[in-house]
Structures are given as structure tokens and as C-alpha cells.
């Protein structure tokens, strides 16, 4: 369709002037899109003209070359041209079922084309017609195609949209024909393509096609390489818009929010550090310098602290909290689980009691202060440790100067912001032990400064990881019994709470508890999972910490925050059902003391792919390498948890391979905002 034909079509759309249309125009205003078609398009997420233009084909078929019928191969797709020499309908089952068949001849052999329950086609095709057909060859005696795409050839017609070219094949929904959708995209791109303009004129880096050309290449490419150049341009646009939003948010904060001066005066930090049984690593010291500079700066701190499991983030958080407390400000620390919150509360109480600093606990089932609100205001700053309960209505945190969020990826962005709004532009430190690949760091936390603790404390034992199959379990249990006999403790992790899955082999902690008690007697086995009452969780954790329970049978609820240095063994059954990053977090529960530790991953479905994936953990303890591998294998949503993490969704961007594009988009966004 040429430009004049496009204008004719656009004038025909609802009788409207083409200038009245925009990319946001609803599809029901387009010619030929009635209520039923509109509903079908909506099921695909296509509501506007722009949605239609960016509806990416799932694949492309090269229909530029015809194949002689005699050269057809079974199970291969091909384009064939020929003349109908016979056609007709066969009925059976009292005419409730039918088969329409036509026979094409091209001078080399004959091809049978068949359609089930499409008897109306008898009125469409006739002997002597010239056809081009495209489909998969389902048989060669005789050559047969079932339900192929067909084009009736007329020497006087324009080149076909569906044949003799590279043809897009779209994701569909029930009742929506491929040819109809292809024609709809074609007609409207010709008519309204002028609406596709550059979002930021003059800022496009070299090497990119225009946005209009990118859409054309996406939908109707001239070569098989063009869709890749289109995806690259459209992915860049997605990354650029995200970077502009994040950098604008950061600039607005710096322009409108004065920073609270919370550098502190060292009156509590010095005795605190002096009382520790270990010396800070150089990485911890470097990060604390960065945090102190932020806390004394002109703008509120917005910093992400990354540190592998066991790297000492909690001590850094304690020092940051003391800086704010020394400055007369209260501090809030939010953790994702009650187990982790209570562990933080106990640690901070032990550290801060001697300094005379009050540490409160606030969870869904427990609070240590009599009231959290205006009736309990105190002149003395305090540390509030809790879960989501800290952000509930009615909880007021007086003179809040610093917000610390542990295991940030377990929270949504709105929860983070809700806690920050408890104060007047407090400083923010978010921490994660899940190493974040750089692509995710730039997209998910692009508005934050980043600090990395890339060094583990001295005196830690080595963690050795082994991948095993179920037939080795008797030897594994014997090994665990030997280590228990030396006084060590162990974790055993299963993926389910109850009702194991026979098909996948998944085990459940409640079903396996009695078996473990018998297998590991006389050592005592404790049971921990998310649905236990808070007092039951606390009791089993207290017993495990005190070595009154030697084996903790648990779900992944122990993934974060559980710190028992004497626990040196971990057995994870059905390990293939966990992500690599999650297994790395689980493994981080051991290796926290001076003794060597052992992590045994048992794959119940020991496929080559599953074993290869698990061997990544056996080969390295580097969390960043593991996170990169997990991202490549499973994608960002699975790596961090799509709903909680706030991972952006992209139509064209791919966080597994587009790091150069993301970095280019960030630099371009900076130039745009500066200009």
C-alpha cells in the first residue's frame, strides 16, 4: 500500500480527518475493527494504535522463494505456486464433519491441500486458479499440507502482503485470524505511521535507525536481520525513558529536600567498635566512609549496600545507625520476616545496651515499646527494628533521621517509600545479600548510589558444595551423622510445607519430619516453616541457637538472617526447584564460624540441565557470578521476585544481554537532563 492508499484508508476510518488521530487513539475507531475484534485485540493487550504498532511478531517466515513440489521435504515449511487441477468436499458423520481438499500442480508433481470443517472454501476456490500456498508438509505420499495459508494470484494485483516476502507471524488469541491481524497492522502503519515521531529529537546516538523505521522493520522487514536492529532501537527507547524517570526523581529530591546532618561525633561508635571481637575489613571501612559522607552531605542519602552473605552488612548498618543516633535522630530498620527482625533486635540490643540506647521491636505479633506514636514521644533518639508493621497507620517514629531496609529485594518500592514518609526526608540505606547484576542495578536501583562490601571477614571456614542424586542419600545421612557427633549442627531444607508432589518428587517438611527424627536419632530435630505461630518459631530458633536442637528441618524461610555459627552443614533436597541466587542465600546460613562447612544439593530430577545449573554453585561461592548465571537462566523476575522487587517490564529490552544499551541510555539521559 503506498502513501496515497494510506491516506484514502485513513479518511475512511470512521469518516474522520486523519489529523484527528494520535498514537493513543483506541482501536475501535479504526476501520474494520468492530466490537468482537476489539475484544480479541484487548485480550492481547492491544488497546491503542501505539499498542498495535509495537505488537512484536513472535517469529518471521521467509516466503520469498518458491519450492518445486517435487523438492518438498516432510515436516518442512515451504512456499509452492501452482494451478488447481481438482477440488471438492467430503462429508461424514451425517454431514457434521467435512474435509475440503484441493490439488495443485506445478509441472513437477502434485500437492494436496486439506482443510477440516471448512466446507465454505468450496465457494472460494475453483479449478484453473493460480495459487501460492505456504505451510508445513505433513506427508509425501502424496505431498500434503494441512490448513496452509493461500494467496490467489492475479497478475494485475500489487505484491502480496502474505507471500513473496518475509512475513510476520504474531501472537494471537482465540478467534483472531493471523492474516486479518497482519493486514490491520499493515494498513494502519501505512495510514498513520507519520504519528511515530522521535521522543527526544537530536539526542539519538549514532548507529540507530529512526523510531518510525524501527517500527517498520519490526513489522515488515525486508531482510531477516532488520528485526534485530528494530528491537535494539525500541529497547533503547524503553531504557532511556526509565533512566530519565529515575534521574529526574533523584534530581527533584536533591533540589527540594535538604539533607539532615547525621554524621555523628563518634562518642558511641568508638566504644562500639572497640567492644567487637573482630576488626572491620577494609571493605567495611571504605563503605562506612561513603555513608558518613552522605549523612553529612547537602542531600538525603539514597544508597544501596550490596554485600555477599556473611560479609558483615549488619555491623555496617549498626555503625550508620549510631551516626544518626549520635546526631539526635531516631533510626528505623525494616526486615522482611519476623525471624530476621527478631534476630536484628537481639543483636542490636546486645550491642547498644552498654551505650544506653533503646532498641524497640515492632512486628505483626510483637512490640516491645508500650506505644509507638504521639503519646509516647521521647526526647532520646531510639532504634526501631521491625517488619512491615513499621509502616502501618498509627505508627509514628519521632524525629526519624535514617531508614535502613534489609533484604531490599523482598520489599516493593511502595513499602520502601511508605517507611521513608514516616520522617521528613530521612536518609535511606537499603541492603541486600542477593548480588545484583549490573543490568538490574542500573534499572532497578538506578536512582541510588551503590556501595559494595567485596571482602569477607577473616577467620571464616571454607564452604564446600557438592551436587548429588537421590541414590546417594544414605551416604549423605551418614556423613551428616558423623559431623553431628563432633558437636556441629545442620540445616535440612525442603521446598514445601506439606503435601509433597509425587510427580516432581518434591518433599514437604511436615511429611518428612518423622523420617528425619528416626534417621538422625539420637540427635534432636526441630521444625521451622512460615505458617508456625510466632512463639513457636522463636522457641525452635532459640533451641537451635543454644544447640538444644542439632538439626533444623525448614523451608526456605531460613533464606535470610538466620545466623548460627556452629551450624556447618546444609542439605537441600529437590535443589533443582530453587533458583541459584536463592540456593546461594540458603548456603549463606553456614560458613559463619571458624569451622569448614558443607552444602549438599540433592537433585530429585537429575536431568543434565538441572545438574549443570547446580554445579555453578559447586564451582564458585562468588555471589555476583552466581547471580549473573541465574539472570541468564531464569530472567530478572524469577531472580528477584517480580511483584516484590519492582523489576521493570520491557517489551523489547532484555536485562540478560542489554547492559551496553542500558549504559548508553543512562549517559543519554544525563545529557538530555543537562541540556
Image: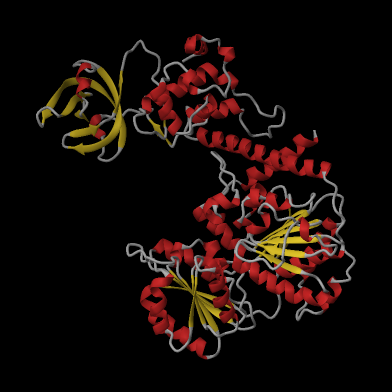
Question: Considering the image in quadrants, where does the C terminus appear?
Answer: top right
Q: Is residue 336 above or below residue 595?
A: above
Q: Is residue 588 above or below residue 15?
A: below
Give the x, y percent position of residue 144. 21, 33
Q: Visible in this render: residue 385?
A: yes
Give the x, y percent position of residue 465. 52, 74
- In this view, the residue in front, 285 or 313, is 313
- In this view, the residue in front, 673 or 66, is 673
Toward which corner of the image does residue 496 lie, by quadrant?
bottom left
Give the x, y percent position of residue 502. 32, 65
Total labels drawn: 0
Give the x, y percent position of residue 256. 82, 42
- Left or right, residue 477 beside residue 455: left
- In this view, the residue in front, 8 or 3, is 8
**Which residue is depicted at the point 65% across and 66% down?**
341
- Left or right, residue 283 beside residue 544: right
**Which residue is depicted at the point 37% across and 66% down?**
500
- Left or right, residue 470 beside residue 123: right
Q: Visible in this render: residue 311?
A: no
Q: Is residue 510 above or below residue 87?
A: below
Specify how the rendered protein is coloured. Answer: secondary structure
Toward which corner of the image does residue 346 lie, by quadrant?
bottom right
**Which residue is depicted at the point 40% across and 74% down?**
512
Q: Is residue 271 above or below residue 488?
A: above
Toward which corner of the image does residue 456 lie, by quadrant?
bottom right
**Which residue is depicted at the point 30% across and 39% down?**
76
Residue, far front: 375
Amino acid at each position: 500500500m503506498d502513501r496515497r492508499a494510506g491516506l484514502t484508508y485513513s479518511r475512511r476510518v470512521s469518516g474522520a480527518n486523519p489529523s484527528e488521530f494520535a498514537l493513543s487513539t483506541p482501536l475501535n475507531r479504526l476501520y474494520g475493527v468492530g466490537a468482537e475484534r476489539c475484544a480479541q485485540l484487548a485480550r492481547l493487550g492491544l488497546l491503542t494504535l501505539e499498542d498495535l504498532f509495537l505488537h512484536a511478531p513472535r517469529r518471521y517466515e521467509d516466503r520469498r522463494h518458491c519450492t518445486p513440489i517435487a523438492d518438498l521435504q516432510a515436516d518442512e515449511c515451504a512456499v509452492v505456486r501452482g494451478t488447481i487441477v481438482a477440488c471438492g468436499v467430503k462429508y461424514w458423520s451425517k454431514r457434521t464433519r467435512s474435509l475440503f481438499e484441493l490439488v495443485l500442480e506445478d509441472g513437477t508433481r502434485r500437492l494436496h491441500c486439506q482443510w477440516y470443517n471448512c466446507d465454505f472454501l468450496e465457494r472460494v476456490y475453483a479449478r484453473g486458479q493460480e495459487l501460492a500456498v505456504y505451510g508445513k508438509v505433513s506427508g509425501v505420499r502424496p505431498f500434503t499440507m494441512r490448513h496452509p495459508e493461500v494467496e490467489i494470484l492475479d497478475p494485475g494485483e500489487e505484491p502480496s502482503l502474505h507471500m513473496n516476502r518475509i512475513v510476520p507471524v504474531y501472537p494471537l488469541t482465540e478467534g483472531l485470524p493471523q492474516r486479518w491481524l497482519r493486514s490491520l497492522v499493515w494498513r494502519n502503519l501505512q495510514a498513520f505511521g507519520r504519528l511515530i515521531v522521535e521522543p527526544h529529537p537530536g539526542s539519538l546516538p549514532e548507529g540507530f535507525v529512526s523510531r518510525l523505521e524501527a517500527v517498520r522493520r519490526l513489522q515488515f522487514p525486508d531482510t531477516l536481520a532488520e528485526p534485530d536492529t528494530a528491537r535494539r532501537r525500541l529497547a533503547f527507547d524503553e531504557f532511556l525513558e526509565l533512566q530519565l524517570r529515575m534521574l529526574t526523581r533523584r534530581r527533584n529530591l536533591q533540589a527540594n529536600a535538604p539533607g539532615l546532618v547525621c554524621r555523628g561525633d563518634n562518642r558511641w561508635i568508638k566504644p562500639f567498635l572497640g567492644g567487637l571481637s573482630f576488626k572491620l575489613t577494609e571493605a567495611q571501612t571504605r563503605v562506612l566512609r561513603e555513608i558518613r559522607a552522605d549523612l553529612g552531605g547537602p542531600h538525603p542519602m539514597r544508597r544501596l549496600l550490596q554485600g555477599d552473605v556473611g560479609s558483615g552488612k549488619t555491623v555496617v548498618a549498626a555503625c550508620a545507625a549510631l551516626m544518626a543516633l549520635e546526631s539526635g535522630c531516631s533510626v528505623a530498620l525494616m526486615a522482611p520476616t519476623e525471624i530476621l527482625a527478631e534476630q536484628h533486635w537481639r543483636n542490636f540490643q546486645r550491642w547498644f545496651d552498654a551505650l544506653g540506647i533503646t532498641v524497640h521491636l515492632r512486628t505483626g505479633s510483637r512490640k516491645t515499646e508500650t506505644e509507638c506514636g504521639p503519646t509516647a514521644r521521647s526526647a532520646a533518639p531510639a532504634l526501631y527494628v521491625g517488619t512491615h508493621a513499621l509502616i502501618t497507620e498509627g505508627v509514628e517514629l519521632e524525629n526519624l533521621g535514617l531508614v535502613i531496609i534489609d533484604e531490599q529485594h523482598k520489599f516493593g518500592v511502595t513499602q520502601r517509600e511508605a517507611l521513608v514518609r514516616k520522617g521528613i526526608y530521612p536518609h535511606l540505606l537499603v541492603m541486600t545479600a542477593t548480588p545484583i547484576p549490573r543490568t538490574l542495578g542500573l534499572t532497578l536501583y538506578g536512582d541510588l548510589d551503590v556501595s559494595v562490601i567485596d571482602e569477607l571477614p577473616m577467620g571464616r571456614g571454607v564452604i564446600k558444595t557438592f551436587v548429588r542424586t537421590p541414590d546417594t542419600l544414605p551416604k549423605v545421612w551418614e556423613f551428616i551423622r558423623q559431623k553431628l557427633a563432633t558437636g556441629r549442627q545442620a540445616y535440612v531444607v525442603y521446598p514445601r510445607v506439606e503435601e509433597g508432589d509425587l510427580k516432581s518428587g518434591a518433599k514437604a517438611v511436615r511429611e518428612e519430619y518423622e523420617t528425619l527424627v528416626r534417621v538422625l536419632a539420637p540427635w534432636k530435630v526441630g521444625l521451622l516453616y512460615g505458617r508456625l505461630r510466632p512463639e513457636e518459631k522463636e522457641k525452635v530458633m532459640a533451641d537451635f541457637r543454644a544447640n538444644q536442637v542439632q538439626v533444623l528441618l525448614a523451608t526456605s524461610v531460613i533464606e535470610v538472617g538466620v545466623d548460627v555459627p556452629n551450624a556447618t552443614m546444609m542439605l537441600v533436597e529437590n535443589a533443582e526447584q530453587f533458583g541459584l541466587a536463592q540456593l546461594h542465600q540458603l548456603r549463606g546460613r553456614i560458613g559463619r564460624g571458624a569451622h569448614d562447612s558443607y552444602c549438599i544439593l540433592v537433585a530429585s530430577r537429575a536431568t543434565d540441565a538441572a545438574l549443570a545449573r547446580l554445579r555453578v554453585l559447586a564451582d564458585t561461592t562468588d555471589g555476583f557470578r552466581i547471580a549473573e548465571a541465574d539472570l541468564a537462566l531464569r530472567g530478572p523476575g524469577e531472580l528477584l521476585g517480580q511483584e516484590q522487587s519492582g523489576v521493570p517490564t520491557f517489551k523489547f529490552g532484555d536485562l540478560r544481554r542489554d547492559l551496553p544499551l542500558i549504559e548508553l541510555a543512562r549517559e543519554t539521559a544525563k545529557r538530555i537532563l543537562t541540556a
